[in-house]
Image (cartoon, rainbow, N blue to C red):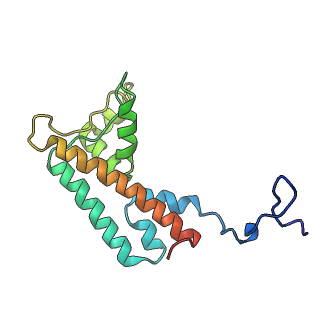
């Protein structure tokens, strides 16, 4: 047995241990999260990149146009952190919308992150639908990042 083979606890080699694909570069995943569709574009999957970018941008824009509110953390409400994580999936879109809603001073205030506003109009007819679109676009982008990871590893074409 060669030293390069991976061993189980009982000393026997694991089947397929040498066939593991190399790890995916973290900057690729970061870029895929930051700009929807860019990860697929960099991997040469141009049509898939355009479709994913269009769907995520359309959902995000629809959420904004329906006066939806981006999730921001609230004190004494731990569930808002989960919703914030979902919205953070939008990458740069989330950051741009927060900047638009709060201004540069709001992002760097002493009340960060609890003093942020997610924008939106709670009395608007489409407020809750808009929130759903914003959450969904963020979660879709996170799934797209996972797809980039699978393609980069060679698990998917």
Q: Relative to the observer, which residue lies in front, 129 or 72?
A: 129
Residue at (52%, 66%) from the top-left corner? 150
Write down the quadrant of residue 84 in the picture: top left
Q: Is residue 49 above or below residue 114?
A: below
Location of the N terminus by quadrant is bottom right
Q: Is residue 108 visible?
A: no
Residue 132 position within the rendered picture, expressed as x and y whole percent measured from the top left: 24, 46
Residue 17 position within the rendered picture, expressed as x and y whole percent measured from the top left: 74, 66
Q: Is residue 83 visible?
A: yes
92 left or right, relative to 10 = left
Marks counted in the figure total 0
Residue at (43%, 77%) from the top-left corner? 45
Residue at (88%, 57%) from the top-left corner? 11
Q: Relative to the observer, which residue lies in front, 116 or 103?
A: 116
Residue at (21%, 55%) from the top-left corner? 61
Q: Is residue 21 above or below residue 90?
A: below
Q: Is residue 55 above or below residue 86?
A: below
Outermost residue toward the top in this view? 76
Residue 19 position within the rendered picture, expressed as x and y whole percent measured from the top left: 71, 72
134 left or right, relative to 24 = left
Residue 98 position within the rendered picture, expressed as x and y whole percent measured from the top left: 30, 42
């Amino acid at each position: 047995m060669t030293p390069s083979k991976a061993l189980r606890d009982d000393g026997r080699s694991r089947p397929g241990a040498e066939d593991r694909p190399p790890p995916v570069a973290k900057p690729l995943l970061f870029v895929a999260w930051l700009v929807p569709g860019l990860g697929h574009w960099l991997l040469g999957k141009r049509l898939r990149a355009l479709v994913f970018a269009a769907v995520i941008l359309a959902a995000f824009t629809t959420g904004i146009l329906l006066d939806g509110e981006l999730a921001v953390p609230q004190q004494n409400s731990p569930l808002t952190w989960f919703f914030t994580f979902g919205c953070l999936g939008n990458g740069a879109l989330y950051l741009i919308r927060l900047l638009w809603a709060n201004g540069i001073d709001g992002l760097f205030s002493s009340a960060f992150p609890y003093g942020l506003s997610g924008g939106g109009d709670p009395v608007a007819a489409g407020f809750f639908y808009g929130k759903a679109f914003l959450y969904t676009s963020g979660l879709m982008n996170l799934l797209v990042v996972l797809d980039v990871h699978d393609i980069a590893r060679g698990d998917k074409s």
